[in-house]
Image: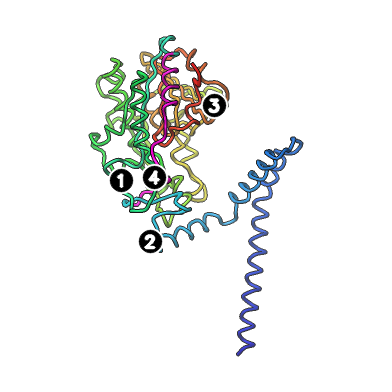
Amino acid sequence: MLEKLLKKKRMTALLFVFFLFAFSAANMRKELPFLWQAVVEWYGKETGEKEREELAADINDAVTEYVAGKHGFVDAYGYVQLLLGKEEEGNFEVVKDREGKLHYTYFAEGIKDTGEYARRAGRLRRMLKAEGTELLYVMPPDKFIAGHTQLSAGLPYHMANETADDFLRRLEGEDVDALDLRKDLTDSGMELSRVFYRTDHHWRTETAFWAASRFCDWMGEAYGEDMDPEGYYKEPSHYHFITYKNAFLGSMGRKAGRLYAGTDDFTLIFPKFSTDYRYRGSHSGNRAISGRFEEVLIDWAALQGGENSFDTDFYGAYLYGNPGFTHIENRGRQDGPDICLVKDSFAVPFAAFVSLRCRTVDLIDPRAYQGDYTEVLKNGGYDYVILMFSPQNLTEEFFSFCEEE
């Protein structure tokens, strides 16, 4: 009996060692090209303490990002958390609300001090005003919708909405006009449980479509800009709505796994009517490309998917994601305004839909833009410059302009 037990244990140990060797071999085969690339990029550079730390971080990223079978492990771990009834993952990096939607959040002691960011916006407004350009702010909604979203007791709340409220009050003191889309949500007729994706931090394309129409209406109310006087561009029947069922796994879903989070439907929206566009951005290597809205502003390759939903980012199909600078010319609307959006990723589908009412739309993403973009804003000949950062992005990264008068 004892001999039998020892035999089983030896066999288990051998199988475990075999698995370790096989798993290590699979990882070496998959990860070596990325490790080699990380090392080559640093080869020949001076390597002080800071550089050595960055090299170590690059190597660690390559090792953790390209683990063999990574997605299977993520799904398995998420399924265990689901069975345990947990409403958070990764030490509260991702939490689940009572509707089953995932959120990025953290424990906040109070609202952020955004006074300096508002003052920078005020300085930018004065600089642009001297050039005949108006500065506006558009505040997208946060995924935590006040009065609707509920978290279980003990889960962290980031107070992003309260920070946004304080920031908008400060903007008012700087004479910067602002459209707060959060206030319009309840009167929009949209089902609040479907404003955001279940597994991603972004609003749905349907919400961005509504927001573009609301923005253009507001421009008429506040500035007399007849961007869509007859409401033609806001009429849903004038657009194709193509829905990819259970195809989209958002940024939070990729962290928590499909079994924990589920997947989202993704709806692609583009005009039925004739359009004529010219586009220049990182997608085209700054070479101009021309064609219809859906030919120029949508990355169809991003919608084809990879091996599974972990490999696709459907949201980035509009305008090819977040390049540092994008220029869009609507050659069918020469009487529209020229605008520039300094933005985060919420503005991507929003800008695509707004472009139908404009002559030109430029987009600047502060995270990727190389150089001082305030000169572009000052000398771009824009009618309007619009700052559009979501409540959680009221941070230094997005307000790196006009630090001094």
Q: Alpha-carbon neighbours of circle 3 within 10 Å: few (<14), some, or many (≥20)?
A: few
Give the side of residue 160 with respect to residue 66, left or right.
Answer: left
User: Is 268 rendered above or below residue 19?
Assistant: above
Q: Quadrant of residue 382?
A: top left
Which residue is found at the position 68% from the left and 50% from the top?
A: 32
Looking at the image, can residue 204 be seen? no
Residue sticking out furthest to the right: 44
x and y, in percent, of residue 312 in the image: 49, 44
x and y, in percent, of residue 303 in the image: 46, 41
User: Is 302 rendered above or below residue 216?
Assistant: below
Residue at numbered disc 4? 244
Q: Quadrant of residue 381?
A: top left
Give, as a three-letter code, the residue at label 4: Tyr
Span highlighted in magenta in the image = 100-126
Residue at numbered disc 1? 149
Residue at numbered disc 3? 369
Give, as a three-letter code, the residue at label 1: Thr
